[in-house]
Every structure is written in structure tokens, then in C-alpha cells.
Image (cartoon, coloured by chain):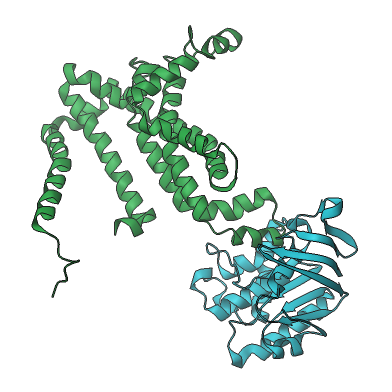
Amino acid sequence: MTTVGSRTPRFVQMGAAFGVVFLSLPVVGLLRRVSWLTLWDQLTQSSSREALRISLYASLSATLLALILGLPLAWCLARVQFRLRRVVRALVLLPMVIPPVVGGVALLGVYGKTNGLLGGVLDSLFGIQLTYSIWGVIIAEAFVAMPFLVLALEGGLRSMNTRYEEAAAVMGASDFSRFRRVVLPLLRPSLVAGLMLAWARALGEFGATITFAGNIEGRTQTTPLAVYTMLESNPEGAYALSFLLVAVCVAVLTGLRDKWIGGISR
Amino acid sequence: MISLHGTVVSGEFSRHFDLEIGHEIVGVVGQNGTGKTSLLRTIAGLSALGSGVLSLNGVTADCPAERVFVLPELRNIGMVFQDHALMPFLSAVDNAALPLVVRGMKRGKANKLALELLEQFDVADVAHQMAPTLSGGQSQRVAIARALIGDPSVILLDEPLSAIDEGSRSTVRLCIREHLNRLGVSALVVSHDFADIDQICTRIENYTR
């Protein structure tokens, strides 16, 4: 016999079904437009290849940058009591909630060559121009991807029992040795999940990149920008690249589910 | 040698201790809440003294009045934690070898020494099992081996036999005692079981609330 609590009302089932349809229709629409016979040719044509190369390079670099800056930040948010902690946490979340194009405008305000807060100095002193360069792509992607990594790492650090670090300290392990031999292995599931989410976000970045780094083929045109550009000139190519991005994201989600967040998705 | 004249604090709890321990094995008994574990944590450097002085082998390790606090990693202590605290991502032998590895010994050599100790504590057969797959008793034996490995100058055992079955306790007690005598260190053993204290220790400190 089913109890009242375990019975799912018909209208909830209907709502859920519509939800599934709403989410899956675009995927179906995309798959329907992919021209399977020319898929390989479309993906290997020079503009697609260049976009994929730039995307891969920039998204991996952005993930690395997010890790270098994000891990210490997550550590402080999880373990250090300081007055501005709430403000810093809000700041970390900001790139997640503001429109990416606004993020791009904000980055221009800092690193823009003519009117940027630091852009002029960087250009005149070191000859470094971030806008409309691969560095601009990396910074824009790191800016929007970092919150995913920081949140995952902060959660992992927060739920970590410090008794293992205490035991290692008594054994004679220095701060660095404890970090390397105890904290990192314990943090591995959160670290891998955070890195994959951040990388997927960086890979799909559009608004901040096009605003801050432009859409220059062979230099700053990442795969999402190429999709946008090709949609008019070469729709087949646009659908082929879109399919590839969806496939990569599905692979990331599947990897996350099976290996790292099995408890949540069961 | 351990010399402690001061107040041990842990959250709301605080208690004054006067302890002088030479190269001997001292049993600490007392009811729950008398500060036995807090005492061990303070000696290990995991908690700071509220006031007073703690010296280990003649060197001041903790003295709030003089702002002296030696970090736990510099105190050269071997410790068995009440919950064993084996690293869940390491095998039994890697756990036992960890104190040597973090001090710079090559893993191969450290594991060889650890394996010898695990043999003496009768857990060599599970040496390559991951820590979370060990039974309570096996895990505790590995934790004891980990506390004794290397050359700690002070050894602290917090309920070191609580998870070991009655039948094999006396063998483990003897093994612990042999090692502590061989090392010739200052050792503190906290236990609820008077038989542990009786067979391992040379002196008893009894604390009441």
C-alpha cells in the first residue's frame, strides 16, 4: 500500500514531464540539424579547427588560473575568520550571477588599453595588451569560471575533518607537507568536480569573451564565438561545433555523476 | 621527559595539572570529563596551555606568559588518537610509514620498516588493504605501529586498546610495553581498562572530577 507521502499527485507528474520535454527539446532540435555525413569535415575545416584549438588552450589556461587564485581563496573562506568574509564570498559569486557581457564590460574598465584602470599602465610600462588577445580570452574565461571552482573547493574544505591534519602535524609534517599529503588527497573529489565544472563553464564562455577579447578568427575566436559567427555563413558548421560542445558537456556531467557526486545523483 | 605545571583548557573545560614524567610509562586513569584527552592534546601541541609551562626533554614547548609555543610538528611525538585517525586514502602500511615519509625518508625504506612493525602487531596480512576496509582492532594496531615508528621522544596513547578484542589484548599490551621500554621514552597511556594500565605502565596518575 502506498502512503500519502509516497504518492505523487498526477499534476506533479505532468509538470515534471513537461519539464523534461522543455529541457530535452533543444537537444533534439540541435541533433536534428546536425548533418552527420559532413560532421567530420565541418569539424576539421580550418576555422573550426582554429576555434577548437583556441578554446582548448584558453579554457585549460583559464581553469589553471582559476585554480591558482581560487584554491587559496576557498581555503580562507572555509577556514579563516575575517571581518570581510561575507563581502569576499559575495564577490566570488558575483561573476556567476551578473550577465557575462557585463563582466566583459567590467574587465574592459580594468584592463582596457585606453580607459582601463590598469590597462594603460600595463601597456606603457610592459607593452602588455590584454584586450583582443588570447590573454583577454583566458582572463574573461577565468573570471566567469572561478566561482564554480571556489564553491566546490570551499564546500570540500568545510566538510573536511581536521583530525587528519592534526594527526599529520603530530607525525612531524610541515604546513606544506600536510597540504600535499593530507589535504589534497582528501580534497580530491571536490577538486576534480570543481575543475571539471570550471573548465566546462570556461569552454562555453561567450558574453565576457566577445566583449573583452573580441571575435578575431585565429586569435580570440573561441568555439562558441565561431558558432555564433558561422550561424549565418555556414549553419552546418555551426551545428557541428554546437554538437561537439554539447557532447563534451554531457561527458563532463556523466564523469561527475559516476565518479564524484554519485551520492547526489543516485 | 615531560614536565607540565599549568592549566589545560578545552572549550569550557579547564584543569590544572602538575606532572613530572621521566623515562617511564605513566598510566592516566579517571572518569570521562577529567581532561585526559585534553592533557594529551596539550602535550602534543594540538591545544595551547591556558597558563603555566610545559617542557619536553628540558625544552620549553608551551608557555603563554613568555609567548613560547612549539608547533606540534617540531615536538617529535608519537600518538595514538582515540579514533585512530588513519588516513582513509592510504593503505595500512602507508599509514604506518607516514611519520617517516613526512620527515623525508624514501617511501620504499619507510614501508619496509613499517611492515616489520605491522608484523609485530600481527597485522602484516592486511598491510596493503586501504584503511577504511580494516576492522576496528586492525585499524588500532596500525595506529599503534604508526605512533611507535621512527624515534619519537614522547609517546602518547589515548585508549590504545579500546577496539582490540579481549582475547588478544594481553599480547598487544606486551608488545606495546616492549617497544616503549626499548625506545626508553616518556610515555603517557590513557585507558579506562585497569588491566591495560597494570600491564603496560610503571606508574599511575589518577584523576577525579
From the viewer's side, name the closer residue of B66 and B194: B66
Which quadrant of the figure contains the N terminus of chain B? bottom right
Task: Identify the residue shown where x is 60% and y is 50%.
Answer: A180
Picture quadrant where residue A218 is located: top left
In this rendering, position of residue B20 left or right of residue A138: right
Which quadrant of the figure contains the C terminus of chain B? bottom right
In this rendering, position of residue A19 left or right of residue B76: left
Task: Identify the residue shown where x is 74% and y is 81%.
Answer: B208
Q: Which chain is cyan?
A: B
Task: Identify the residue shown where x is 29% and y is 60%.
Answer: A266
Query: Quick check: can you spot residue A78?
Result: yes
Picture quadrant where residue B26 is located: bottom right
In this rendering, position of residue A137 left or right of residue B93: left
| Count of marks overlaid on the render | 0
Considering every residue shown, the one lying at the far bottom of the view is B167
Image coords of residue B139 (percent x, y): 57, 75
Picture quadrant where residue A24 is located: top left
Task: Identify the residue shown where x is 49% and y is 73%.
Answer: B133
- The relative height of residue B109 versus residue A35 in the rendered view (above or below) is below
Image coords of residue B89 (percent x, y): 52, 62
- The relative height of residue A201 versus residue A3 in the rendered view (above or below) is above
Image coords of residue A242 (percent x, y): 23, 31
Chain A: its colour in the image is: green
Image coords of residue A30 (percent x, y): 15, 34
From the viewer's side, name the closer residue of A15 and B78: A15
Query: Quick check: can you spot residue A130?
Result: no
